[in-house]
């Protein structure tokens, strides 16, 4: 910083420089500096006067500070003579600008403050000044004389630091220029490579499109088949390794004897604890589903029974009879709670809705009736078919019911409106003896009197799977889905056997032998690998089959 005395106008350098090392030696000692400052008083006084009036002071070599411009520092250091004259004239500035009078300056320098300083006092004061200048860390450059134009000086360390800083800045600039050049060059190379790759890819696509357009339809079809073959082989191998491809091994566990005539229907309760069997002997018998132990007999119908069904909570049963009635039973007490009358011919089939609030029944009078379970009244009569109705079944949410008939039609009905939503018929139009929704209600399994079971997609009316190999051309044999150990289709047969097909491959995976007459009815346990079956007059037994996997 440049400090200027307010009275004298003398400029002082207040800028601090880094201290020189202890080993550096100034070219002139403090004593020689004082001696050089001891010029004639007249010259010193003249210099001080000029400085006070803002005029440029002459250096010892006769040049003014204005003429000097060799250094990078734009400040003007006062000469020792000017400092001495200024002190004698009016005082000096120390520290932060405290001013001392001339007498105080003389006393501080060792004089009496009453007159001019002696030569010895001047020497002492010059030594003090030199000491202060050393503290201010302004040292002359080694090997140089007094600075031109008032003594502009630099420390050697300061010059060295400036040189190092300039060298480092120059090196950094060159590195930056190189990195920018290399970066831009690499960017140009990568951009050029990307454009080249895009152009090559485009050429390949155009070539492939041209080759494809030149192929004949037969060649294109052959290529598509070759591409599909690995996918099909992979799917077949996965299917071969899947658990569904394993064959079941059901064995006979129990033969339940008690009915006096042929068994017409067997049904497991939804909770899996009970098995109900209906018979032409006018009764329903209840059995323990796991142990085969007899529980009770439900009696009340006056003619033989054709079907039995359970409510969703397993508390109630409903039966269809040749006495033209449907009866609702309490399982716990075995009592008939309601008798539903309205059909004009044999009631052949019956089904509960999932909420157990409605019943659907099919009859030889060619109608389907919907009953309110709470009141026991018929709430809707559907003129469903032109022949006896052989089967009815509700879907999973209870909004639709499917019916089948000897007229060869499968019809789906809206429960709310009573409208026919869909009619499904095979091109050969064989009589349909049984129909049932799949567990997810997306498909329909139908048995026909041409020794065939078919799986239909009722949304599209398309037949998806055909299962054959059994015998069924006379009786209304039941079918069912088994989903506990694998996905099987299970059905009775007129050759006294029970057949199991793989749902997907349509392969017969097992044939159960044990009955001695037509196996009319089958059902699959909802939770365990158990199958129940019932047979006609010559057998009259109910059998339970288990698969220990």
Image (cartoon, rainbow, N blue to C red):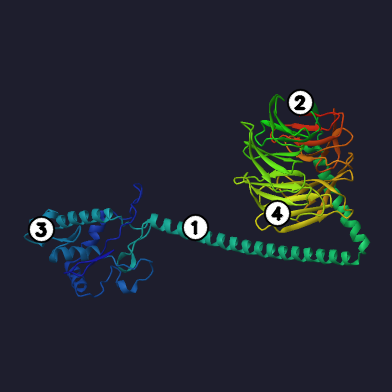
Tag 2: Cα neighbours inside 10 Å, few (<14), some, or many (≥20)?
few
Q: How far apart are marks 3 and 4 (CA)?
A: 134 Å
Going from N to C along the chain, the mark reached first, 3 or 4, is 3
Per the image, the residue denoted by label 2 is: 258
| Picture coordinates of residue 191, whole percent (x, y) | 68, 65
For the residue labelled by badge 1, is the local secondary structure a helix, a strand or a loop? helix
Going from N to C along the chain, the mark reached first, 4 or 1, is 1
Going from N to C along the chain, the mark reached first, 1 or 2, is 1
Q: Residue 271 carries which label?
A: none
Given this view, does label 2 or label 3 mark the residue nearer the observer?
Answer: 2
Quarter of the view holding residue 380: bottom right
**Which residue is at the front of the view, 525 or 90?**
525
| Picture coordinates of residue 274, whole percent (x, y) | 68, 31
Quarter of the view holding residue 266: top right
Per the image, the residue denoted by label 4 is: 381
Given this view, does label 4 or label 1 mark the residue nearer the observer?
Answer: 4
For the residue labelled by badge 3, is the local secondary structure a helix, a strand or a loop? helix
4 and 1 marks in contact (CB < 8 Å): no
4 and 2 marks in contact (CB < 8 Å): no
1 and 2 marks in contact (CB < 8 Å): no
Per the image, the residue denoted by label 1 is: 168
Per the image, the residue denoted by label 3 is: 104
Tag 1: Cα neighbours inside 10 Å, few (<14), some, or many (≥20)?
few
Going from N to C along the chain, the mark reached first, 1 or 3, is 3
Number of marks present in the image shown: 4
| Picture coordinates of residue 393, whole percent (x, y) | 72, 46
**In the picture provided, is 147 more to the left or to the right than 411?**
left
Q: How far apart are marks 4 and 2 (CA)?
A: 36 Å
Q: How far apart are marks 1 and 3 (CA)?
A: 51 Å
2 and 3 marks in contact (CB < 8 Å): no
**Which residue is at the front of the view, 362 or 63?**
362
């Amino acid at each position: 910083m440049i400090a200027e005395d307010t009275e004298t106008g003398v400029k002082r350098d207040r800028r601090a420089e880094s201290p020189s090392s202890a080993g550096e030696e100034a070219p002139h000692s403090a004593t020689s500096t004082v001696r050089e400052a001891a010029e004639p008083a007249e010259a010193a006084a003249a210099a001080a006067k000029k400085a006070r009036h803002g005029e440029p002071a002459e250096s010892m070599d006769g040049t003014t500070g204005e003429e000097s411009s060799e250094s990078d520092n734009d400040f003007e250091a006062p000469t020792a003579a000017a400092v001495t004259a200024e002190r004698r004239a009016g005082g000096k500035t120390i520290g932060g600008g405290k001013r001392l009078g001339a007498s105080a300056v003389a006393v501080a320098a060792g004089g009496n403050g009453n007159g001019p300083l002696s030569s010895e006092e001047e020497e002492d004061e010059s030594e003090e000044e030199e000491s202060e200048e050393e503290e201010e860390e302004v040292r002359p450059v080694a090997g140089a004389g007094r600075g031109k134009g008032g003594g502009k000086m630099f420390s050697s360390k300061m010059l060295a630091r400036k040189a190092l800083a300039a060298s480092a800045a120059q090196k950094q600039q060159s590195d930056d220029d190189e990195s920018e050049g290399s970066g831009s060059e690499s960017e140009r190379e990568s951009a050029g490579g990307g454009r080249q790759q895009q152009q090559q890819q485009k050429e390949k696509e155009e070539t492939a499109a041209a080759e494809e357009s030149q192929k004949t339809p037969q060649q294109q079809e052959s290529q598509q088949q070759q591409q599909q073959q690995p996918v099909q082989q992979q799917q077949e191998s996965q299917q071969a390794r899947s658990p569904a491809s394993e064959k079941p091994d059901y064995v006979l566990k129990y033969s339940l004897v008690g009915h006096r005539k042929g068994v017409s229907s067997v049904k497991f309760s939804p909770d899996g604890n009970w098995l109900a069997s209906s018979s032409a002997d006018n009764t329903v018998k209840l059995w323990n589903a796991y142990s085969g132990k007899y529980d009770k007999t439900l009696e009340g119908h006056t003619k033989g029974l054709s079907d039995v069904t359970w409510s969703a909570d397993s508390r109630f049963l409903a039966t269809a009879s040749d006495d033209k009635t449907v009866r609702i039973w309490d399982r716990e007490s075995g009592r008939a709670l309601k008798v539903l009358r309205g059909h004009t011919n044999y009631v052949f089939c019956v089904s509960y809705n999932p909420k157990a609030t409605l019943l659907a029944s099919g009859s030889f009078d060619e109608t389907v009736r919907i009953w309110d379970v709470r009141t026991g009244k018929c709430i809707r009569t559907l003129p469903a078919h032109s022949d006896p109705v052989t089967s009815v079944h509700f879907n999973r949410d209870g909004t639709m019911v499917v019916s089948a008939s000897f007229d060869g039609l499968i019809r789906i009905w809206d429960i709310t409106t009573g409208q026919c939503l869909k009619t499904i018929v095979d091109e050969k139009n064989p009589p349909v003896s049984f129909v049932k929704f799949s567990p997810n209600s997306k498909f329909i399994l139908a048995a026909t009197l041409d020794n065939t079971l078919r799986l239909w997609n009722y949304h599209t009316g398309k037949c998806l799977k055909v299962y054959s190999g059994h015998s069924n051309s006379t009786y209304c044999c039941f079918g069912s889905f088994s989903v506990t150990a694998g996905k099987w289709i299970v059905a009775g047969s007129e050759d006294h056997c029970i057949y199991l097909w793989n749902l997907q491959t349509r392969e017969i995976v097992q044939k159960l032998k044990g009955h001695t007459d037509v196996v009319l009815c089958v059902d699959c346990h909802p939770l365990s690998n158990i199958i129940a079956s019932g047979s006609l007059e010559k057998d009259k037994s109910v059998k339970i089959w288990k698969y220990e996997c």
